[in-house]
Image (cartoon, helix red, strand yellow):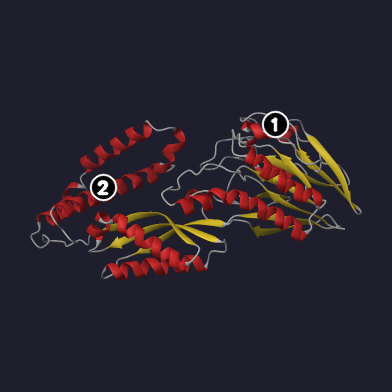
Amino acid sequence: MAFRFVHTADLHLDSPLRSLSLRNPELAALVGDATRQALVRIVDLCLEEQVDALMIAGDLYDGDQTSMKTARFLATQMQRLHEAGIAVFKIRGNHDALSKITQELVLPPSVKVFGGRAEAVELKRGGLAIAIHGISFARPQAPDSLLPKYKAPIGGAVNIGLMHTSLAGAPGHDPYAPCSVADLHAHGFHYWGLGHIHQRTHHAGERMVIMPGMPQGRDINEAGEKTVSLVTIGEDGAVSVEERLTSLAQFARVTVDVSAAADWRGLMDRIGQALETERARTRSGHLVARLRLTGESGLAFRLRRDLDLLLAEAEQRAERTGRTWVEKLELAVVTPSLPGQAVSGDPVQELGVLMREEVLPAHAFRQEVRDLVQGLLDDLPPEARRLAGHDAAAFDAFVDTVIREGSEDLVARLAAATGEEG
C-alpha cells in the first residue's frame, strides 16, 4: 500500500501587505486573504486525494503575530484534517520562532510539531515502514547547518526529512541553517521536504530533494503561479512527485510595447490585448499585473503628464478582462529621436533633444547621478537596497533608468506647464 502526502512550506499566514498599493480596497482585500485561501486549498487537496499526511516545512506564520483570529482559522483547518484521519507533521522556521501563536495555539493530537532536537516518527502504511525526521528552529536565527543533528536513516524504512534551510544561499534570502544540496543527497533519506526559499526548485540527484516554494505569492517579487508537492511513495519505496496549483492570486509583470500605437485609443487597445493574453495563460483564479509600457512614442509626454488617467483606464480594461487587476503601472516610454534637427522649434522639445543628445550621455553628469543614488542607498536598510540590483551591472542599469526616466518626467512637466498637449 502506498504512502501519500502533501508537502508545503512558507505560507506566512496573514502576512501584512508590503508593496501593494492600498488605494484599491478590493485588490487589497483579495491579496490580504490569499494566504488563508491557499491553506484552505491545501487542506482541500489533502481531503480530495485522501492522503496520509500533510507536511509543512516551516514558516506557517509570519513573525510576531498576536491575532487569535489567525489561530482560530488555523485550528479549524487542522481539525478538518484530523476528522479525516490525515496526520500533520510540521517544523518551525525562522518566522514561526517569532510567533506568539506558536506557543499559545492548541492543535488536534494528529498534528505533530517537531521540537528543537532531532526526532524521528515511525509509522506503518500496510507493509511499508515510514520514518519522518524533523528539527524546528528554537530561535529566529540559525547560522549553522542543522544537517549534522538529524538522525541517521532508519534501516528498512523510507526516510523523509523536513528541513527549513537557505541551502547555499539565494538572492533576497538571508542565510538560515545553510547546507549543501550534495550533503542532503548523501545523507541517505529518500525524500527531503525543504522550506524557506520562496521559489520552487527540484534539486536533482540520487535522492528526491524538493523546495516547494510558497503556495501563494504576496507581491510582484513573488510572481508566477504557486504550488505544492503531492508525493507518492510506492510499495517498492519509489518516490514520485506531482506539482499541484494552490495560488488564488498570481502576480505577473506584463510588458507592453506601445511604439506602434498611433493615438491614445490605440495605446489602450494594446494594453487590453496584453492583459487578455496574460490572463489566458494564467491558471490561478486572479491575475494581478504590473504593467510596464515601453518603446518610442509621440505620446510619451502625455503619458507622464496624465499618468493617473492612464492607470484608471488600464484598470477598466483589466476589469473588462475579468479576474484581472493592475497593481502598478510603470513607464519606460521615450519621445522618438529626431537626429540632426530641433523639433518644430518648440523650446520644450528642443530642451528634450539637447538633454538626450548632449547632457545625459556626459560622463561627469552620469557620475554625479551615480554618486547621488549610491548615497541614498547607503542610508536605506540592507533589505531595501535590493531595488538597485544585486551586482555592479544591475546597479549601472538602474542608474541609466533613473537618468532616462527622470529626464522624461522633467520634460513632460515642462510641457504640461506650457500647455503642451503631446
Q: Nearer the viewer, residue 15 or 261?
A: 15
Task: Name the residue at 46% across, 51% down.
Answer: 25
Which quadrant of the rendered structure holds the C terminus? Answer: bottom left
Task: Name the residue at 11% across, 59% down.
Answer: 342
Q: Which residue is the extreme one toward the right?
A: 127
Callout 2: SS: helix
Say the numbered circle drawn on residue 406: 2
The kind of residue on which mark 1 rests is Gln
The local crowd at label 1, few if under 14, some if 14 to 19, many if 20 or more residues have their Cα within 10 Å, is few
- Residue 240: image quadrant is bottom right
Confirm whether residue 57 shows in the render.
Answer: no
Question: Residue 254's spot in the image, x, y percent?
Answer: 43, 60
Task: Name the residue at 67% across, 58% down.
Answer: 243
Say the numbered circle drawn on residue 103: 1
- Residue 370: image quadrant is top left
Q: Nearer the viewer, residue 310 or 235?
A: 310
Question: Residue 119's spot in the image, x, y percent?
Answer: 80, 35
Contact? badges 1 and 2 (CB < 8 Å): no
Q: Nearer the viewer, residue 389 or 305?
A: 305
